[in-house]
Amino acid sequence: RGIMLLGKTLETQRNNIWLYVNLAKAKLELGQMQEFTGLLKAGKELYPEYEPLLLLEATAYYSEEKYEEAYNSLLRLFDVNPRYLPAEKLFKEVKNKLNN
């Protein structure tokens, strides 16, 4: 039901980046990768360097075991905001995977 509400609201608020973030996050958690990818792309067209979107992108890569891509997404995120705390845990996990 929450996903439906977010989708309906997005139809009328196309520039609300938080709607893209939250809907994309929900789709990622449900494993609906095609929908996730579309929402991520649309959100990045609005705000290409928006930290929560870059973190979602890195999270998706990580869940697909694409550690190099996850690492690169996180590096872009830290270029934008070196102190973005929500990304630190994933960054450590990705570095650990790449070093093993």
Image (cartoon, rainbow, N blue to C red):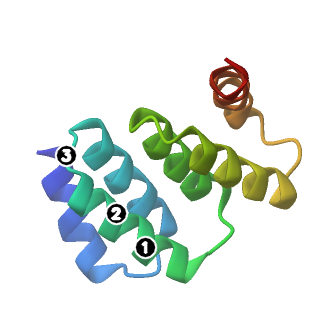
Q: Secondary structure at mark 1?
A: helix
Q: How many marks?
A: 3
Instruction: Tell me how far mark 3 sits from mark 2, CA to CA.
Output: 19 Å
Give the left or right position of residue 39, taking residue 76 as reference.
Answer: left
> Percent x, y for residue 21?
45, 56
> Percent x, y for residue 65?
45, 34
Contact? badges 1 and 2 (CB < 8 Å) = yes
| Residue type at tag 2 | Thr
Q: Residue at x 19, y 50 (%)?
A: 3
Mark closer to the chain start, 3 or 1: 3
Residue density around tag 1, few if under 14, some if 14–19, many if 20 or more, within 10 Å: some
- Give the answer, above or below, for where 91 lies relative to 97: below
| Residue type at tag 3 | Gly
Instruction: Tell me how far mark 1 sits from mark 2, CA to CA.
Output: 6 Å
Q: Which residue is mark 3?
A: 2
Name the residue nearer the viewer: 12 or 50. 50
Q: Which residue is mark 1?
A: 41
Instruction: Tell me how far mark 3 sits from mark 1, CA to CA.
Output: 21 Å
Q: Secondary structure at mark 3?
A: helix
The quarter of the image holding the N terminus is top left
Q: Please identify the residue farthest to the front as the structure is shown.
A: 100
Q: Which residue is mark 2?
A: 37
- Give the answer, above or below, for where 21 lies relative to 11: above
